[in-house]
Image: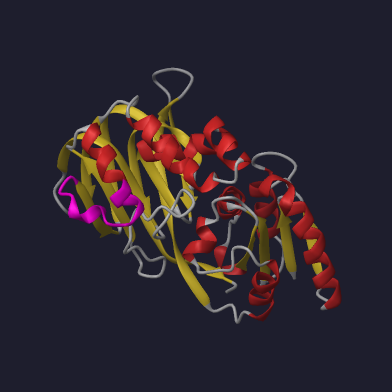
Amino acid sequence: MYHFIVNIHGGSGKAFLQWNKIRELLKEKNIEYITHVPLRVGHAEQIARDVSKLDESDIKIVVVGGDGTINEVLNGIEDFSKIKLGLIPTGSGNDFSRGLNLPRHNYKKALNLILNSTGDKKIDLGKAEIEESGLSDERIVHKSRIFGISSGFGLDAIVGTEINTSKIKKVLNYIKMGKLSYAFLTVYTLFKMRTQTVTLKFDDEEPKSFSKMIFMAIMNFKAEGGGVPMAPFASGFDGELSFCMAAGIPKLLTFFAFPFLLMGKQKIFKSFTLRNFKSLEVTSNSSTICHTDGELMGNVAKIKYTTLPAKLTVLV
C-alpha cells in the first residue's frame, strides 16, 4: 500500500496545487493509496511512526514535500526493513532529491519513478547523538536524530536553521532570487559569530584539536542549503559519511574562499579539511548550534556521528 504524506503548505502554496494534480494521475492509473496530511511541526514524524507500525510487510511511504518533511519521516520510521520511501519534491532546497538525482521540478516524472521502481536500491543515513543540560545542571538529556542529507556544527548549522525564517530569503524569494539566500545569510552570519576550538576523534584514530573552527558539515550527499557542494565527493551509497570543516582561517579569508566553496573547489585551501569516516566524536570548548537536515537539534558542546550503511530503501 502507498501512504502519501503530503505537506500541503510547502513550496509557498505550490505543494497543494501539485498534490491535486498528483491525485488525478493516481486516479487515472487506478493506484490505491492513503493520504496523510501533517497538521503541525513534528506531525509527519508521528504519522511515519504510526504507518511503520502497521501489520504489513511492504509499506511504501511517499513524501510530497521538502527536506524538512523528509527528516521528520526518517525519524518517525521504527522498522526500516518494512519501509520503502519515495519522494515528490515540493520544497525550496530539495537537497535530498538532488542527492538521489530525482526530478525536482517534474512531479509526473517523479511519480512514475516511484510507481515503476523495483524497490531494491538502498542508501546510507547518518545519526547524530548529543547531550544537553536538562532543567537542572545535574540532569543530562540524551537526544539522537537521523539525517538523510547533512548535519552541521557552527556557521553551517546557524545558517541552516535560520534560512527558512530569514528576512533575506523572503526578500530574495520575492524578487525570484531565492537561490542566493543561503550565500547572503552565510556571509552575514560569518562576521557576527564566534569561532570554537574543537577536538575530533575519527573512527579508531587518535583525537586531534583544531582552533578557530568556523563550521563543520557532516554530509551524506554532496550538497545542502539548496545545492551548496559542501562535500563534492560524498555519496549516499558508500557506507560512510563525508566531512568538511573550515578552521584556523581568518574570517576575512573565509569570505574570499566562499565562492570556491560554492563551486565545490574548497579543497585548494589548506584550512579546509575534507575526508570520509564511519564514526566521529566532536568536543567543543563552547556550545554552538547543531542541525540535522536544516532542523535545529540543540545548542551543544559534544556530539557523536555514526554512519547507518544501506539503511533506507528508496523508490527510484
Q: Is residue 68 left or right of residue 253?
A: right
Residue at 28% from the left image edge and 38% from the top image edge: 255
Q: Dividing the image into 4 quarters, which one contains the C terminus? A: bottom right
Task: Determine the residue positioned at 36% across, 36% down.
Answer: 155
- Quick one: quadrant of the N terminus? bottom right
Residue 71: x and y, percent? 55, 51
Number of numbered discs on residues: 0
Q: Residue at x 60, y 41 (%)?
A: 175
| Whether residue 300 is visible | no
Q: Position of residue 202 (x, y in %)?
A: 22, 52
Place residue 263 in its image quadrant: bottom left
Q: What is the span of residues highlighted in magenta in the rendered image?
A: 259-271
* Of residues 52 and 315, the one drawn nearer to the viewer in this rendering: 315
Q: In the image, residue 214 lies at what x, y percent?
A: 28, 36
Instruction: Specify whether 294 is left or right of 60.
Output: left
The answer to whether residue 267 is magenta is: yes
Asked whether 177 or 197 is in front, the reply is 177
Q: Please give left or right for residue 314 compared with residue 33 in the image.
A: left
In the image, 246: left or right of 153?
A: left
| Picture residue at 68% right of the left edge, 48% below the top | 10
Q: Position of residue 207 (x, y in %)?
A: 16, 44
The residue closer to the viewer here, 8 or 285, is 8
Q: Is residue 316 magenta?
A: no
